[in-house]
Amino acid sequence: MEHDPAGQCRCGQQPAGEPAGCFLALYGAALRTGRFDWDLDTGLMTMDATAHEVFDVRPEQYDNRPETLAFRVPTVEGHRLDQIVSHALKDGSETYGAYFRIRCHTGALRWTHTQGCIQRDETGRPRRIVGLVRDATRELGDSPAALRERADEEAERRRTTSLVQGTTAALAHARTVRDVIDVLRDTHGLAHLGASNLVMGLVEAGRIRLVAEGPAGSFVPGTDFTGVDEDYPMSEVVRTLAPRYIETADDFAESYPLLWPHIDELGISAAAYLPLIAQARPIGVLGLLYQDKTGFTEEERNVLVALGSSIAQSLQRAMFYEQEKDLAQGLQQAMLPRTIPGVPGAEIAVRYRSAALGRDIGGDWYDVIPLPGGHVGAVIGDVQGHDTHAAAVMGQLRIVLRAYAAEGHTPATVMARASTFLHELDTDRFATCLYADADLTTGVVQLVRAGHLDPLLQRTDGSCHRVSVDGGLPLGLSAEFGRLDYPVTTLELDQGQTLLLCTDGLVEEPGADLDDGMRALAELAAVAPRDLQRLADRLCGIVDGRGGDDDAALLLLRRRTADAPRAGGRLQQHVAPSDPEALAEARHMIRAAVRAWGAGERADEIELVADEVITNALMHTDGSAIVTLRVLTGTDRRLRVDVEDSSSALPRRRDAGESGVSGRGLLLVDRLADVWGVEARGGGKCVWCEFIVPAREERE
């Protein structure tokens, strides 16, 4: 026997030279035993060679950590042994002893005995355990009766171990607190222990909130929330952090007189209340209610303790999940527009659906941006990922897109700047996006797509088709690869037509082609109600019906001319030199305005003349051109096109000759316009043309 330098034996109970009273010495003299020394501060436990033999482990298999021996100690045995040691540490005991089984490398079970001596400091805090471990097979005997008894015990142990493992496996798939409760209530779960039902409470801010109330009709008024200091079994378990086994109905009635009158008629004859402890603090309480049962065997208690540990871990995961989900959903709702502004000339409907599975949070978003001059911006987008980070990036992108659009940038510039912003945000996320700038006066819609789905267009007869929009790389990636040129696609949105923008969660299904999903959405829109809000609900019914693991966002924009902005019948467009995009936008504006203002019969003539005058201004001057369209009322209703430039040189009509390629412009203007002329404007000039167009009443 070894002694420390202070002259004490390793167990700390006898002075050196007086080993007769030390239980280690007694055991060492009688039997060949293995020794261990467990430092509770570091958690390390050293063992001698004999102890390695008892546990049937090679020295290289053991790293001085007790948990490493778990592969030799069956789960139920380990929980029971832990309970014995924990109880001794808490109640001030100096020693403990326990029989338990280990599983040898051959698979056979072998009885083992351990005895430990607890060393404490001056405050009574346990600091160290030294002890013995030995093979106890011969001590327990090998008689047929004993063997049969151990065989029965082993069969029961396997059954209960299987129950613990099966319940633990089922709990691994539980996401929410309700999922945990459903697993425990399953007929293949704790009911195999004989429990008729269960109650469960969560510890929140010093109170216990009831989340499962037991059998139907068993709810006790006033117990939705109970204090930890109240006279209820759940409160007692939270206070003591120890299981409470109520073995008889009389025990229940005597121990909890406030609770018993409410449950007397339920036939409850016994109950077990288990503390659910995670990270050294109580997070909840599980109560198992029994009928036609009295008392709890040691084996039953061990199984319940083992189950309580597994349930506590699953419950903590579920609570963390729900907390994160609530935080993420709150963040996302804060990032999405709280209300959609009223926009003259448009009817708008938006919808958002969270994923039915997964984290219930993502980076999908929509936005509606009122813009000057009767324009409105419509945005739909999706940030990569399903977590709070995706929601945070989404919120920032939504803000910058709105800011860039409000500054008056073209749709292509808005998208390019948003991509640069995301690239510089120091995040590994990218985003897809579709931005539509709709002129509600003329119906001209400019679309820019960054890796997103194409939009759908629903005609006034309800038919719906996919609009092919030229696209660029997703936001963030286009900046990283230096491909910030986003093409612009233009379409005309007539009165009563609807533009449909959505994210892939609305059309994408696992194993299905995305194009098929888009076609199915278009077919559904064609037979859906025409009312815009009901249409939105019907389209989102796809997600509501099938569920899914992705979010879905939807934005519907329908043009209506009844309250569309008129701006006095005047539109203006700035066309910079060497800017084909601006020239194309001016042409679309002219074409749409001519039709919107009831001059459709002369649309080709007006567009041709305006294009010629604009081209001349850009070719023969060094500056830009300003194109203005307006309706003049008087004796005749006229549509006037003004093209201003910065040059004071007046245009001259020339004879182009048979092979000339220039000189025909003013001749064309003279032939097609009813009247035209040139006016000096400061340092420049204005070439104007007027076309007589009948009033709407006259055409009808």
Image (spheres, rainbow, N blue to C red):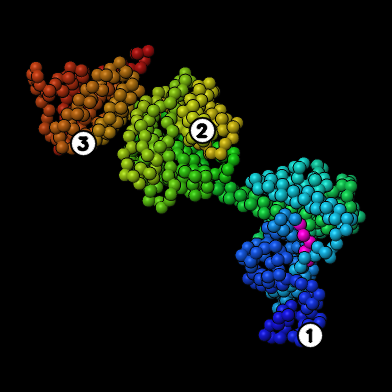
Front residue of 635 and 190 = 190
Are discs 2 and 3 less than 8 Å apart at CB? no
**Residue 614 position in % (x across, y down):** 21, 29
Query: In the picture, which quadrant includes the C terminus?
Result: top left
Residues drawn in magenta: 109-113
Dot 3 surroundings within 10 Å: few (below 14), some, or many (20 or more)?
A: some
- The residue at the point 68 percent across, 59 percent down is 70
* Secondary structure category for the residue under label 2: loop
The residue wearing badge 1 is 18
Q: Give the residue number, with chain letter if any, for mark 3.
A: 577
Residue 53 is marked as none
Q: Please name the residue shown 68% across and 70% down the image.
A: 49
Which label's residue is closer to the chain start, 2 or 3?
2
* Residue corresponding to mark 2: 508
Question: Which of the two labelled residues, at mark 1 and mark 2, occupies the earlier sequence position?
Answer: 1
| Amino acid tagged 1 | Glu
Left or right for 608, reference 177: left
**Residue 3 relative to residue 592: left or right:** right
Q: Main secondary structure of the magenta part?
A: strand
Where disc 3 sits, the SS reads loop
Where in the figure is residue 170, as x and y percent of width and height? 69, 45
Residue 59 lies, with reference to residue 580, above or below; the image says below
**Label 2, label 3: how many angstroms apart (C-alpha)?**
44 Å
Q: Nearer the viewer, mark 1 or mark 2?
A: 1
Q: Which of the 4 quarters of the picture holds residue 595? A: top left
Task: State the SS at label 1.
Answer: loop
